[in-house]
Image: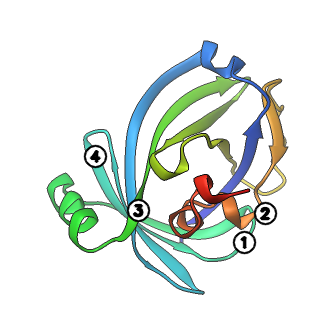
Amino acid sequence: MATEIERKFLLLNEDWRDIVKSDTQIVQAYLANNEFSSTRIRIQGDKANINIKSATLGITRTEFEYAIPVVDAQLMIDNLCVKPVIEKTRYIVKHIQHIWEIDVFSGDNEGLIVAEIELSSPDEAFEKPPWLGKEVSNDARYYNVCLVKNPYKTWN
């Protein structure tokens, strides 16, 4: 069994843009979502995967991810997935000894920017960058699977 330990944060400013190492376009959509799990198809650059993740709230979740052909992924997104799709640019930023993934959303979630850090244990220490804001790890609204049903553009 695979475990994902991830914390999510909002951002205070755009100072992180000065230290971006790389970026990639991501399109993802959900085949299924229920009280136990979600099944996602993602195209990231020239790669694609299917991902099954537990529906638990918090920083530790069960996750399985497998590579699939990009052509198959696009067909699934176009014909089998719930709409709207999630569109975002993922920026990779290194701060001290950790890698941060900063997702800048577009489409129905335009205006939302979230920073994520993956950890090796729930209590792993890390230094917060000066551009990091409020933690939203336990707020389900910021989960990509929830952004399909309740896009950022509809928030008050």
Q: Earlier in the sequence, mark 1 or mark 2?
A: 1
Query: Compared to 58, does 152 lie above or below?
Result: above
Between circles 3 and 1, the one closer to the viewer is: 3
**What is the x, y in percent for residue 85?**
39, 58
Q: Circle 2 sits on which residue?
A: 138
Residues tagged 1 and 2 counted as in contact (Cβ below 8 A): yes
Amino acid type of the residue that numbered disc 2 sits on in the rendered structure: Asn
**What is the x, y in percent for residue 74?**
21, 58
**What is the x, y in percent for residue 93?**
60, 26
For image coordinates 80% across by 30% down, the residue present is 12
**Mark drawn on residue 84:** 3
- 87 vs 47, nearest the viewer: 87
Tell me the crowding category of disc 1: few under 14, some 14 to 19, or many 20 or more residues within 10 angstroms, Cα based. Answer: few
Disc 1 to disc 2, how far (Cα)?
6 Å
Q: Circle 4 sits on which residue?
A: 47
- 28 vs 70, nearest the viewer: 28
SS at circle 4: strand
**Mark drawn on residue 57:** 1
Q: Earlier in the sequence, mark 3 or mark 1?
A: 1
For image coordinates 54% across by 30% down, the residue present is 92
Amino acid type of the residue that numbered disc 4 sits on in the rendered structure: Lys
Q: Is residue 108 left or right of residue 3?
A: left
Q: Earlier in the sequence, mark 4 or mark 3?
A: 4
* Res 24 → quadrant: top left
Disc 4 to disc 3, how far (Cα)?
21 Å
SS at circle 2: loop
Query: Compared to 33, does 116 lie above or below?
Result: above
Amino acid type of the residue that numbered disc 3 sits on in the rendered structure: Pro
Disc 1 to disc 4, how far (Cα)?
28 Å
Disc 2 to disc 3, how far (Cα)?
23 Å
